Image (tube, rainbow, N blue to C red):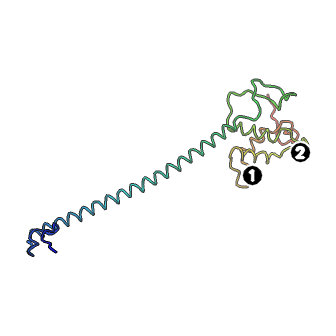
């Protein structure tokens, strides 16, 4: 087999005599090829890092999307809760009529706290047993749950929940309980 025309052999290799300059040229080419391999390897590592960072950013974006979606669903539920189950009419009446389910009041707006209080009031005080009215502590705990208020360390309803429960307790029961002192108006 004749290797005299092998393109990979440096000139003069056919006759067995390679010069020092040919060896240096080959060494430079090898060094350049190794440098190119190192440079390309570093670029590949850089691209891998970029891909990893992009993957993390994508995961953060997905998590943020889910958090925003959940918050919007909670806000929607809150808005739904603000619309009371009973109709708010444009007048104030003195008491329940034969056609109503309670007293109607026209409000310029309703807050989440008012909506929660109205819901709990409707739940506990619509058609309650006069011989066995709801306990204030139970009503206060329901308000805490409805408004996402934190109970006191001892397990008692929050002070806000207790205050709101007292605010929606019928006046005639407060007077009968003798727990609340009515301030005289002067």
Q: Which residue is mark 2?
A: 132
Please identify the quarter of the rendering in which residue 39 is found: bottom left
- The residue closer to the viewer here, 53 or 2, is 2
- The residue closer to the viewer here, 115 or 25, is 25
Figure label count:
2
Q: Position of residue 157 (x, y in %)?
A: 74, 49
Q: Position of residue 133 (x, y in %)?
A: 86, 43
List the single residue furthest toward the front.
1
How far apart, in angstroms, are the residues tagged by discs 2 and 1?
Answer: 21 Å
Quarter of the image containing the N terminus? bottom left
The 10 Å Cα crowd at callout 1, few under 14, some 14 to 19, many 20 or more, is some
Element assignment for label 2: loop
Element assignment for label 1: loop
159 lies left or right of 20: right
Quarter of the image containing the C terminus? top right
Q: Name the residue rendered at 46%, 51% in the picture.
A: 57
List the single residue furthest toward the top.
91
141 lies left or right of 5: right
Please identify the quarter of the rendering in which residue 169 is found: top right
44 lies left or right of 169: left
- The residue closer to the viewer here, 44 or 1, is 1
Eyeballing the image, is 23 above or below 110? below
Q: Position of residue 110 (x, y in %)?
A: 68, 33
Eyeballing the image, is 165 above or below 26? above
Q: Position of residue 104 (x, y in %)?
A: 78, 28
Q: Which residue is mark 1?
A: 156
Q: Nearer the viewer, mark 2 or mark 1?
A: 2
């Amino acid at each position: 087999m004749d290797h005299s025309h092998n393109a990979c052999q440096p000139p003069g290799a056919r006759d067995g005599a390679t010069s020092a300059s040919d060896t240096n040229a080959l060494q430079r080419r090898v060094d350049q090829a190794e440098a190119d391999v190192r440079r390309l390897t570093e670029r590949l590592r850089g691209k891998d890092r970029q891909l990893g960072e992009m993957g993390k950013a994508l995961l953060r974006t997905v998590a943020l999307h889910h958090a925003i979606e959940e918050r919007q669903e909670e806000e929607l539920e809150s808005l739904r809760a603000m619309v009371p189950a009973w109709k708010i009419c444009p007048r104030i009446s003195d008491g329940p009529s034969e056609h109503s389910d309670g007293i109607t009041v026209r409000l310029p707006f309703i807050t989440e706290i008012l909506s929660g209080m109205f819901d709990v009031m409707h739940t506990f005080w619509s058609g309650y047993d006069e011989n066995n009215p709801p306990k204030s502590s139970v009503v206060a705990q329901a308000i805490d749950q409805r408004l996402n208020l934190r109970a006191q360390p001892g397990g008692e309803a929050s002070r806000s929940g207790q205050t709101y429960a007292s605010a929606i307790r019928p006046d005639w029961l407060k007077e009968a309980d003798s727990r609340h002192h009515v301030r005289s108006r002067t």
